[in-house]
Amino acid sequence: MQVRPQEIEYTKEIGSLDGDSVKELGLKGGYHIICAMKKNGTVDYLGVGPHRAVARFMARKRRPSIQIIAELAKSEDFAPQHFAHLVPRYEAMLDSWIASKK
């Protein structure tokens, strides 16, 4: 997957991971990406999904030490059991995307 700058609707710093900035990218099509911006200039993709809560859940699952400082609004957050059946699909997509970046 290639994300072009014109496809990004917003970028928001939401936390940190091992001293690196963690950002949430919202794409114009409604897809969300959580990534750590490494000090050496590389990007560590942590979570993706059709909703901010799904992407953040995946990031926390993949890297439990992530520190999220910008939480979701009450109306945007929902329990993981509502989307747990989708997580393996999005994990496979993320793994494929990460593999293609190497």
Image: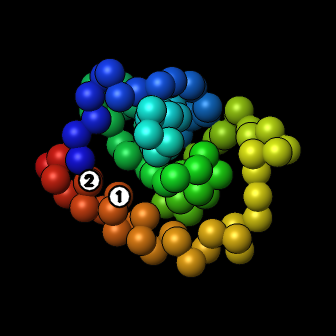
Does residue 63 appear anywhere in the picture? Answer: no
Name the one closer to the observer, 76 or 44.
76
Secondary structure found at label 1: helix
Against 44, residue 23 (above or below) is: above
Amino acid identity at mark 2: Ile
Residue displayed at 35% across by 58% down: 94
Residue displayed at 43% across by 64% down: 90
Residue displayed at 42% across by 71% down: 89
> In whole angstroms, how far apart are the C-alphas of marks 2 and 1?
6 Å
Q: Which mark is residue 29?
A: none
Secondary structure found at label 2: helix
Residue displayed at 45% across by 32% down: 28
Question: Residue farthest to the front?
Answer: 29
- How far across and down, in percent of the image, does residue 35 sit? 44, 40
- How far across and down, in percent of the image, does residue 71 sit? 74, 38
**Callout 2 touching callout 1 (CB < 8 Å):** yes
Q: Which mark is residue 98?
A: 2
Q: Which residue is mark 1?
A: 94
Residue 40's quadrant in the figure? top left
- How far across and down, in percent of the image, does residue 10 sit? 51, 24
Name the one closer to the observer, 1 or 39.
1
- How far across and down, in percent of the image, does residue 100 sit? 16, 53
